[in-house]
Image: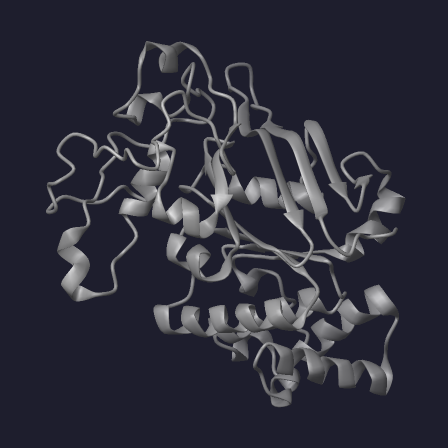
Amino acid sequence: MSLPDEGPLLVVDDVSVVYRGRGPRAADVRAVDGASLSLDVREAVGLVGESGCGKSTLARTIVRLQEPDRGAIRFGGVDIAHVPRRRLRRLRRGLALVFQDPSTSFNPRITIEGSLLEALQATHGRAGTGGTQRIVELLDLVGLGEEVAARYPHQLSGGQLQRVSIARALACEPRIVVLDEPVSALDVSVQAQLLEVLARLRAGTEAAFLLIAHDLAVVRQVCDRVLVMYLGRIVEEGLTREVFAAPHHPYTQALLSAVPVADPSQRGSKDRIRLPGELPDPSAVPPGCPFHPRCWRASERCREEAPQLLPIGPRRVACHHPLAVDDLPAPPDATDKDRSPARVR
């Protein structure tokens, strides 16, 4: 397969994933609902949203660990959503997935060297001295010494094991690396170290990265663009710096209001928004705009008509009443700084 040197490397077009209910009264769950996105060569894109919004399902669908019910996933121009399994195995060499919990993705009876060697052999057939040297190079790439190769997974910390996960993903020399919440289980200091590793990888490899995260501060540090997801739908997309500076969707504004402020002198200057209620049950998505029961800008149109993801300048926003760059009204009682922020998990 010929992959481009610039421009779109991955195009996800109107993808939906439905989990069928079991039993006569069980409702279907539309985990991903018409999601569309693109990923350019050497680009880093962040995908954010509350727990349960469909981020991980979309990540697994992109690498075909989950079958889509509708839509296309074009990788290098080939729709991998509809290719036979035999051909898919070869195409998958260009895609890699790093799981949220690395401890569940390693064989506890195999050393780190053995796990990395398996990845190399599956992709390149490397073994012996050549494979051993490549393992040392991969561990160095993620900031680990060659002594780690002789250890077993349980002998490494969570941060070390997550670095090994990234090294294993890079072993197949992928063009796209999908990272599903790679730092969520780590403490703050280890998160910072892993983010430095990701920054070095961006500079030192040709791969593009799709970073799934609930921590918007992580996305701000690593990603060129950000997509905001709510109940299986993309509701806003744009350059990270622009979205953070002036969100157009009310849900994005609520998420950003919950990002901690590092400077103690500035903590009282930021209003936090608490959204009413919980994320709706994905098996019973509200009619119209799915966000309207929690939105302070909702109108009758929002309750009846689902907004489309449409361009607004350089961005795409799915909202009937988007917040303008020069018009960012606070929700009612947003100046109450003592209450809890919008919950982002």
Q: Is residue 318 above or below residue 79?
A: above
Q: Position of residue 188 (x, y in %)?
A: 35, 68
Instruction: Please state the horizontal and vertical placement of residue 312, each as a whole percent of the image.
Output: 48, 31
Which residue does the image show at 46% across and 17% down from the upper left? 306
For this orientation, the residue located farthest to the bottom is: 147
Point 58% across, 83% down: residue: 144
- Place residue 17 in its image quadrant: top right
Q: Residue at x 37, y 68 (%)?
A: 187
Q: Is residue 125 above or below residue 59?
A: below
- 117 left or right of 13 in image: right
Quarter assignment of residue 123: bottom right
Return the residue nearer the eye: 205 or 131. Answer: 205
* 180 displayed left or right of 74: left
Residue 247 rendering spot, x and y as whole percentages: 37, 40
Q: How many numbered marks, from 0 up? A: 0
Instruction: Give residue 184's position: percent from left, percent from top.
Output: 43, 59
- What scheme was used to colour the molecule? one colour
Q: Is residue 48 above or below residue 268?
A: above
Quarter holding residue 341: top left
Q: Residue at x 28, y 23 (%)?
A: 297
The reply to whether residue 240 is visible in this rendering is yes
Quick one: 245 or 12, which is closer to the camera?
A: 245
